[in-house]
Image: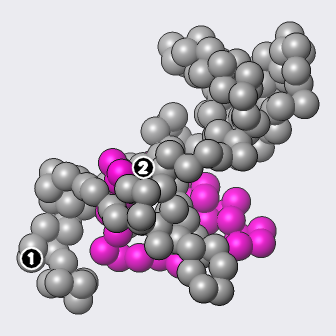
Amino acid sequence: MIVPDYAAPAAVLVPHFYSDLTPLLEEIAVRTARTTGVILLTREPALTEAFLAVQPDRKRYRVVTAPFDSPWLRDRAPVAVRTRAGMRWFVPRYRYQGRPRDNRLFWRILARGHPVLPVPYLPGGNLVVGARGLVFVSRDVLRDNGLDEPGLHRHGAA
């Protein structure tokens, strides 16, 4: 069963870097930290340390320093699947290769203790998972990832 996106998380990953999105990402981190943990993914440690220095409850935050290309990391994020043997992590297929650091990021993070498996017919992008593990995805996301009807046949998944 795929674990629903809206299951209560132990922490939320927020990318943190210099851009016009920095104030918005920091506001998301501050509001999230009121109720759950925050993992700040940074490629600029000095910026993140300055942000943390003014946070009232710093113990709610953890920092991961790693290279990444964009804030749109959810497109590349692994999907958690609960099996009889425990939790497994699957990395979705993502057709557009213009973000090589984003493509490698979760492989590197999960390689430290969680087996990661590629799934050629699980699309990256806008997946929504229901409470019982049913995945909803748009035809556009499938098409954009080469997983329309002909694409699924090429991968042996149809």
Q: Is residue 108 magenta?
A: yes
Q: Residues within 10 Å of mark 2 (few under 14, many from 20)?
A: some
92 sits to left or right of 43: left
**Can you name the residue that lies furthest to the left here?**
150
Question: Which sits in the foreground, 70 or 143?
Answer: 143
Q: Quadrant of the C terminus?
A: bottom left
The magenta-colored residue range is 99-128
Q: Position of residue 48 (x, y in %)?
A: 78, 24
Quadrant of residue 40 within the rendered picture:
top right
Q: Residue at x 74, y 22 (%)?
A: 34
Residue at 36 percent of width and 51 percent of height: 128
Q: Secondary structure at mark 1?
A: helix
Q: Is residue 105 above or below residue 117?
A: above
Does the residue at mark 2 contact the one at mark 1 (Cβ under 8 Å)?
no
> Image check: 81 left or right of 92?
right
Q: In the drawing, does residue 155 fall left or right of residue 5?
A: left
The amino acid type found where label 1 is placed reads Pro
- To which quarter of the image does residue 41 belong? top right
- Who's the residue at 66% across and 19% down the image? 31
Magenta stretch contains residue 100: yes
Work out how far the residue at label 2 is from the one at label 1, CA to CA, in angstroms.
22 Å
Q: Is residue 18 visible?
A: no
At label 2, the amino acid type is Asp
- Local SS, label 2: helix
Q: Nearer the viewer, residue 78 or 35?
A: 35
| Residue 92 drawn at (x, y percent) | 42, 65
Q: On residue 93, which mark appears?
A: none
Whether residue 153 is visible here, answered yes or no, is: yes
Q: Which residue has dot 1 on it?
A: 150
Location of residue 61 by image quarter = top right
Q: Which residue is mark 2?
A: 75
State the residue in front, 134 or 61.
134
